[in-house]
Image (spheres, rainbow, N blue to C red):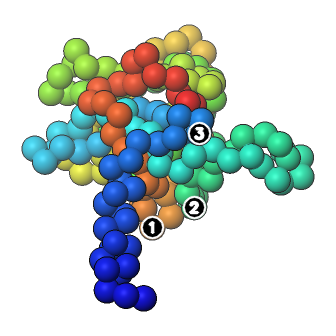
Amino acid sequence: MHPPTIALLSLLPSILAQTPPPSNLTYLTAPALVTTPQNLTTIQCWRLTTPFRTSTTPGTSGTQAVTIANITNLAYTILPPRYDGGLHTAPAPQIVHYLSGLAHITLPQDPTLSLYLVGGKGGLLFAADTTGLGHITRYPSDQATVALLAPFEGGEVPGYEVIREGPCEGVQTFV
């Protein structure tokens, strides 16, 4: 390679980082709990940088799938009706998917900024606030809430971009 080619190749990652994702691709978007430099938890809307691809896996061939990350110690959790999880941080960077029920997350420093997660398609959350003051999670419905908790292997959060500060209002969870 000639020196100018090497220089252009070294710029490629920064050029690609500034390029918006192609409009014909679908990306997983979900709210995230993160720790601020002030050691407080805040809510952001994240879009993963890896797009959905057409699956070639038997049984799901032709459908849309995205590999999020390697996970460890997947937990299937049943939370009783009206359970109060109290103030806490995420035990590890993880993806939480509420399959049923209702979760209400508030921030102790700003109770007006909150997040309701209804079990099912819209029940996805990235919990990455492993340090700081933390968040409060309550389960206010009259039915049990079921969740899958999947810590990222090695604490490695998948690549993402912040779409906005605050919840993903008006943003489809899977697009």
**Closer to the eye: label 3 or 2:** 3
User: In the figure, is residue 84 to the left or right of 122?
Assistant: left
Q: Among all residues in the image, which is located at the extreme top?
A: 142
User: In the figure, is residue 112 to the left or right of 128?
Assistant: left
Label 2 secondary element: loop
What residue is rendered at 40% in x and 38% in y?
A: 46
Screen quadrant of the N terminus: bottom left
* Residue 14, image x, y percentages: 31, 60
Q: Are marks 2 and 1 in contact (CB under 8 Å)?
A: yes
Write down the residue under mark 2: 70
**Closer to the eye: label 3 or 1:** 3
Mark 1 Cα shell of 10 Å, populated few (<14), some (14-19), many (≥20): few
- Residue 31 vs 139, above or below: the answer is below
Mark 2 Cα shell of 10 Å, populated few (<14), some (14-19), many (≥20): some
Tell me, for residue 25, which label it has, or none. 3
Q: Which amino acid does label 2 sit on?
A: Asn
Image-quadrant location for residue 119: top right
Q: Give 103 or 62, whichever is nearer the viewer.
A: 62
Image-quadrant location for residue 144: top right
Label 3 secondary element: loop
Cα separation between marks 3 and 1: 28 Å
* Residue 122, image x, y percentages: 55, 24
What residue is rendered at 62% in x and 53% in y?
A: 67
Tell me, for residue 52, which label it has, or none. none
User: Of callouts 2 and 1, which one flags the residue occurring earlier in the amino acid sequence?
Assistant: 2
